[in-house]
Amino acid sequence: MENLRCKSNVKSIKNTFYDSTYNEDELKYFKNEEIEKILNFQRTNNKFTKTPLINLNALSNKLNVNNIYIKDESKRFGLNAFKVMGGIYAIGKYIAEKLDKKIEDLTFEEMRSQETKNKIGDITFISATDGNHGRGVAWAARELGQKSVIYMPKGSSLTRLKSIQKEGATAKITEVNYDETIRICDKLAQENDWVMVQDTAWEGYDKIPLWIMQGYSSISKEIVEELEYNNLSQPTHIILQAGVGSFAAGITGCFMNYYGPENVKIAVVEPELADCYYRSFALNNGEIQAVTGDMN
């Protein structure tokens, strides 16, 4: 597949940096028992609904493969996106640590109780987003009785801004790109003693991004449970979208743990204007490549 340009104008490149040996240090956070605890916590919210795994029969017949399934995250918590699964766990985990308790021993109702509020006080969570992540953070903060501030990069949709504001957040669109908006939020968090909830990690900031990735991973757990309940074969190929890559990495970590690195092939798909993974894999030196400039 290396450097292949398909008829549909999709560029493809093989990841030559992949090491198929099991990486215990990286993957221990995505073991089945860990993700099960996370999903069980997410289920304690009374608005929780399992999203459907839909069999695309017509497409699989057309392509002459056994089955193609799509996980329809538009049904998640009524928010039309998977991103809330990361925000809901990261904020819950932060509150659990403030209470000096394990998150698996707590429920949403306990976290949002007046007793909890008396112990930890008011917390403001801040995040940069182009829409769905910020809405998920705002929703989770409100659901847990806390506040949120959300900043969006230049060019963001006014409709998405209003959706975030409806979740109770203080939100605005900046005049700079996504990366610069993250820097603004980080500075505000430090100045105001707010909590940064970002799915992008950097030096000195990796705990909350890891929690977000683990929150996304529970989607994999749902998929595995449904396949096994219906006596369906394990997947051979998994196709994941990438923005900054937290969703793709979290889902990959879970499936690698469950099925083993040799038993599933994973493709990551990203928009051409933000093709960080493609550019990084195209180099021979292993350096991570960034994409700058304005994006729609």
Image (cartoon, rainbow, N blue to C red):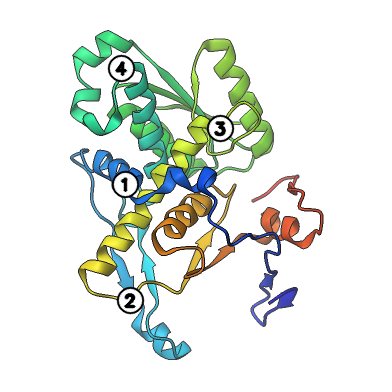
Q: Residue at x 62, y 37 (%)?
A: 153
Tell me residue 54's x, y (percent).
Answer: 31, 71
Amino acid carrying label 3: it is Asp
The residue wearing badge 4 is 99
Mark 1 Cα within 10 Å, few/some/many (few <14, many 20+)? few
Contact between labelled residues 2 and 1, with CB atoms less than 8 Å apart: no
Name the front one of labels 4 and 1.
Answer: 1
Q: Residue at x 59, y 47 (%)?
A: 244
Tell me residue 168's x, y (percent).
Answer: 36, 27
The earlier-in-sequence mark between 4 and 3 is: 4
Contact between labelled residues 1 and 3, with CB atoms less than 8 Å apart: no
Q: Looking at the rendering, which quadrant does residue 89 occupy?
A: top left
The residue wearing badge 1 is 33
Side (left or right) of 7 relative to 227:
right
Question: Element at badge 2?
Answer: loop
Amino acid carrying label 2: it is Ser
Mark 3 Cα within 10 Å, few/some/many (few <14, many 20+)? few
The earlier-in-sequence mark between 2 and 3 is: 3
Q: Is residue 259 above or below residue 257?
A: below
Q: Is residue 175 visible?
A: no
Q: Looking at the rendering, which quadrant does residue 215 occupy?
A: top left
Mark pair 3, 1: CA separation = 22 Å
Question: Element at badge 1?
Answer: helix
Mark pair 4, 2: CA separation = 42 Å
The residue wearing badge 3 is 206
Q: Is residue 217 above or below residue 171?
A: below
Tell me residue 16's x, y (percent).
Answer: 71, 64
